[in-house]
Amino acid sequence: MNINLTLFAQALAFAGLIWIIATKIWPPLLSAIEERQKKIAEGLAAADMSQQTLAQAQEKVDAELRDARTKANEIIEQAHQRANQIIDQARDEALTEAARQKTLADEQILAATNRAREELRKQVSVLAVSGAEKLIRREIDASAHKALLDELAAEI
């Protein structure tokens, strides 16, 4: 065989192989590579977008937490104020009740004192009548001299 013919046949086979690769294998391979690059780019863009969304969500969460803390502090302050109001109101009611109880006790003491005085007056009048009986040696009629005994009891 001739080297030129062999070289030409090899060149023709190589050209045919290049043509088959360029028309049949290379375009699907390039489209697969381009599709893969496109998916990778989309994935990176989605990752960047997700990071931005995550950062925005974190900022929102932080803002909501600040608002919640502020509201919680306001509620706690209101609760403290209400507790102080309740304590003040209870103290005022207790003082009012204590004053009422003291007034009632004073009235009861005054009434008991008056009853004791009246009882003492009666006992003194009985003793005076008894003493007068012994002095006069005769019995005084209490019903007949009631006005006199009442006057004597009032003086005592």
Image: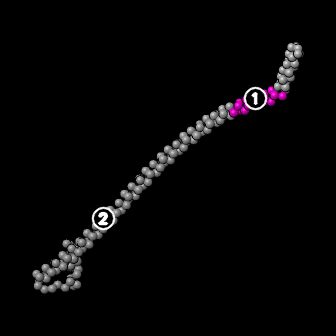
Tell us which disc is closer to us: 1 or 2. Answer: 1
Under mark 1, the amino acid is Ile
Residue 38 visible in the snapshot: no
Quarter the N terminus occupies: top right
Dot 2 corresponds to which residue? 106
Chain-order first, disc 1 or disc 2: 1
Q: Quadrant of residue 58?
A: top right
- In the picture as drawn, the residue positioned furthest to the front comes out as 1
Image position, residue 46 (x, y; %):
68, 34
Image position, residue 74 (x, y; %):
50, 45
| Magenta span contains residue 41 | yes
| Magenta span contains residue 8 | no
Q: Does residue 64 sit above or below 14 in this rendering?
A: below
Dot 1 corresponds to which residue? 33
Q: CA distance from mark 1 to mark 2?
A: 106 Å
Badge 1: few (under 14), some or many (20 or more) residues near its Cα, within 10 Å? Answer: few
Residue at the spot x=53%, y=44% of the render?
71
Residue at the spot x=15%, y=81% of the render?
130
Under mark 2, the amino acid is Asp
